[in-house]
Amino acid sequence: MARYTGPVCRLCRREGIKLYLKGDRCYTEKCAIDRRAYAPGQHGQSRKKVSEYGLQLREKQKARRIYGVLEKQFRLYFKEADRQVGITGENLLRILERRLDNVVYRLGFAASRNEARQLVRHNHFTLNGHKANIPSIQVKAGDIIQVKEKSLKSPKFLEIKETVAQKTPPAWLELDSEQLTGKVLELPAREQIDLPIEEHLIVELYSR
């Protein structure tokens, strides 16, 4: 399983916005981008004119880092989105949103997508009653994601159960906070994906 293992706060600083990669820490005064709102490295504070290509690249990197996807897999997602009917950029975001680790995060079962990815890999969830430990599984309308009965007794999920009721998942998901179960009501529409991503720049980048 390939994944980024370096310091994640510098990724937010590089993109210039909060990517919420460290969960609750991102909402505190310890957040790196609040303390040092400039790019990392010795030239991070210098002002640079960004080219059109640079803008497109930054948008692609931002999307990759938000969802925790490496370049090869992201490119495959783009090719799949390009083959589908509809607007390629919206198709791409819809594919990324349908990843199992993202759905677990959206339901409030994890503080960040990185944590959701780890929980999925450690076999804490089932998909339609079957074992699901691959973070990149694509969910479909009608799918049910549930915390395993054995995992419900763990301190981690007892803590989650106390806080998850206060969270509101997006409209395309349904949450049962008592049973720690989520259901995919429909595939997400673009207006239901509340991320600061200009997907048309990603399409322009890969269309060069």
Image: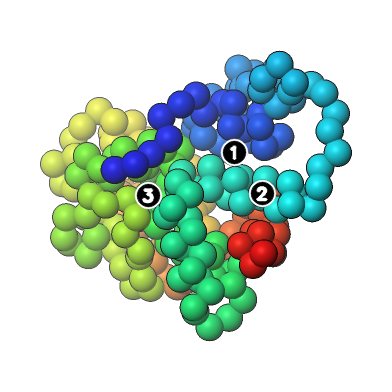
The crowding category of the residue bearing disc 1, from other C-alpha atoms within 10 Å (few below 14, some 14 to 19, many at least 20), is many
Please provide percent x and percent y for residue 12.
62, 32
Q: Which residue: 13% across, 41% down?
A: 150
Please provide percent x and percent y for residue 207.
64, 67
Task: Judge by depth and name the residue closer to the eye, 15 or 196.
Answer: 15
Please provide percent x and percent y for residue 82.
53, 74
Task: Judge by depth and name the residue closer to the eye, 179 or 58.
Answer: 58
Badge 3 marks a residue whose secondary structure is: helix
Q: Are marks 2 and 1 in contact (CB under 8 Å)?
A: no
Q: What numbered label is drawn on residue 19?
A: 1
* Residue that protrudes farthest toward the bottom in the picture: 85
Q: Which residue: 46% across, 63% down?
A: 77
Name which residue type carries label 3.
Asp
Name which residue type carries label 2.
Leu
| Horizontal side of residue 193 vs 68, given as left or right | right
Q: How many marks?
A: 3
Vertical relation: 134 (above or below) 151: below
Badge 1 marks a residue whose secondary structure is: loop
In this picture the colour scheme is rainbow
